[in-house]
Image (cartoon, rainbow, N blue to C red):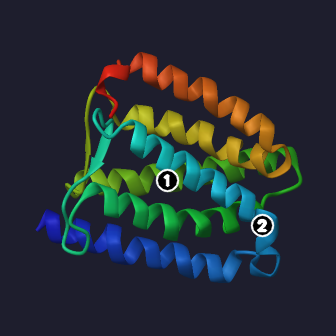
Amino acid sequence: MKFVLGSILLQIIQPLLFLIAAFIWGDWRNWRRYYPTILFIICMDFFSSILMYPHPLWKYEESLLLPNHTLTDYFIALLMYPAVVLIFLANYPKKKMAQIGWILLWIVIFSLTEYISIISGLGTYHNGWNFTWSVLFNCVIFPTLRIHHSRPLWAWLIGIPIGAFILIYFDFSIKMMK
C-alpha cells in the first residue's frame, strides 16, 4: 500500500500540483527572465546525479510509472523545478521579513514533499545522508536560487564550496567516479 500511495503522490499528484500552481502563480509572460535560474537548478541537479551515481546520498526507488532513480530524477528536474522557479522568483517579496517568510515556506514545502517520498518508500537515504541534511540543503538552495536570479556568478561561487563540502564530508572518492 505504501508503494502505490507513494507512486501516486510523487509521480502524479505532486507534479500536477506544482504545474497547476505554476500556471496560477508563475510569471509565464516573462519566463525568459527566469530561464537562466531554471537552467541553473537543473544543471546542479544533473551534476549531482552524475557525480553521485556510484555513491548516492539519496535514491528514488522503483515505482509504478518510472522504473528507476535516473528517470524519476530527470522527471522531477525537468517538470517540477521549472515550475518551482517560476513561482518562487515571480512572487518573491520586496520586504525583507516577507522574503524570509517566503524562503521558509519553500523550505517547508520541499522538506514536506521529501518526507512524503521517504515515508512512502519511494525515496531512500544512503551513505550518511538523512532528512536533516535535506532540510539544511533546502535552507541553502532557495536563497541561492534568488541570488542566482540577480547575481548568477555569486550563486555558482556559493554552489562550488557547498559541493566540495558534500564531497569531502560524505567521503566521495575520485576512484569511484567513472
Q: Is residue 121 left or right of residue 157?
A: left
Residue 33 vertical placement versus 100 (above, below): below
- Going by the numbered disc 1, the residue's amino acid type is Phe
Q: Residue at x 51, y 20 (%)?
A: 165
Residue 170 vertical placement versus 81 (above, below): above
In the image shown, does 53 or 132 lie closer to the viewer? 53
Quadrant housing residue 49? top left
Residue beneath disc 2: 90
Q: Is residue 61 left or right of residue 165?
A: left
- Secondary element under disc 1, as helix, strand or loop, is helix
Image quadrant occupied by the N terminus:
bottom left
Q: Residue at x 51, y 33 (%)?
A: 136
In the image shown, does 31 or 111 lie closer to the viewer? 31
Q: Is residue 145 left or right of residue 95?
A: left
Residue 34 vertical placement versus 17 (above, below): above
Image quadrant occupied by the C terminus:
top left
Residue 11 disc label: none
Residue 51 position within the rendered picture, expressed as x and y whole percent measured from the top left: 41, 37
Q: Residue at x 38, y 77 (%)?
A: 13
Q: Residues within 10 Å of mark 1 (few under 14, many from 20)?
A: some
In the image shown, does 101 or 35 lie closer to the viewer? 35
User: Is residue 91 visible in this depiction of the protein?
Assistant: no
Residue 54 position within the rendered picture, expressed as x and y whole percent measured from the top left: 28, 35
Residue beneath disc 1: 110
Quadrant housing residue 65? bottom left
- Going by the numbered disc 2, the residue's amino acid type is Ala
Measured Cα–Cα span from mark 2 to mark 1: 18 Å
- Secondary element under disc 2, as helix, strand or loop, is helix
Residue 118 position within the rendered picture, expressed as x and y whole percent measured from the top left: 27, 50
Residue with the most extreme right position: 94
Residue 90 position within the rendered picture, expressed as x and y whole percent measured from the top left: 77, 66
Residue with the most extreme left position: 1
